[in-house]
Image (spheres, rainbow, N blue to C red):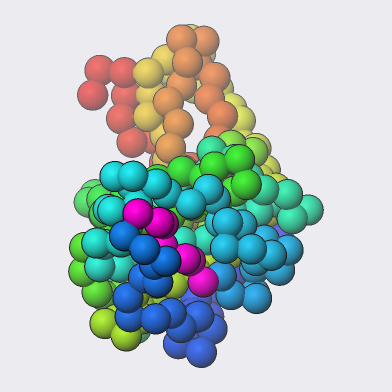
Amino acid sequence: DDSAPSSHGDRPLASPGALSEFDNAAKQRDDNSAPIVAVPDSLGANAASPHALGAAPTGADAATLADASFVIEGVVLGANHEPVRAAVVEVFAAVESQTTRDAAAMLGQLDSPPQAIVTTSTDRRGAFRAVLAEAGAYLVRAGAAGYATQIEGPVRLRERQRRISLSFALADGLGVAGRVVDAAGRATGGVVLHLLEKSPGADFGYQQLDATSATDGTFRFDGVSSGRYILVVAEGPHG
């Protein structure tokens, strides 16, 4: 695919100045009320009220959030600023000095891809909340069917900054489809394929998507960003 290169580049994903500062402890009206969540103006219309990031937790959920050490929360929007419902949001441990491309290449490793520390999904308003046990640097990846995956971070949670709010704007994803056949031209199902964005001077890079061929040999990758890619056949139907 010789379409335009991805626009993410080698920029750092976030700087301390771009992150909203929050109080060290969650504000509570009383022991039975939910924490008041501060929402930065950068979320635009979604910051109209403390409930713009989703319904306030109650009962056991409120207690869990109040006791939680650190929180990453925010919204996932589409290209037209529409809320993206049921988007998958994953949080990974990171190195604070990583750039966008370094971080994405780490997530796209074929041999030993990192495991998410927290996986959650957005509600009907596109809101998400991930509760973490300790301070540190983190990458946050958001994706949904029909949209290109986006990565933000590294973001840093500290003792004096226990909450961070992010806003994702997912571009419409492209589709890549094909058919797997053997040497005799017969359709081959059960073949595992990886689609890797080509980085300058490297054999893999920014984005990895996975697919498995159907019984008729067909496969499809959705949510692909524009760019140049390498298609890798990772495993045949018999290993």
Q: Is residue 105 visible?
A: no
In-image side of 3 versus 112 (left or right): right
Residue at the outermost bottom position: 17
13 over 207 or under it: above or below: below
Q: Position of residue 191 (x, y in %)?
A: 38, 24
Q: Residue at x 50, y 80 (%)?
A: 20
In-image side of 12 versus 173 (left or right): left
In-image side of 112 versus 191 (left or right): left
Q: Residue at x 54, y 83 (%)?
A: 18
Residue 52, picture quadrant = bottom right
Frontmost residue, 223 versus 73: 73
Q: Residue at x 45, y 87 (%)?
A: 16
Residue at the outermost right position: 80
Q: Residue at x 54, y 42 (%)?
A: 123
Residue 205, picture quadrant = bottom left
Frontmost residue, 75 versus 176: 75
User: Magenta span covers which residues?
Assistant: 32-38
Figure quadrant of the C terminus: top left
Frontmost residue, 46 versus 168: 46
Q: Position of residue 176 (x, y in %)?
A: 62, 37
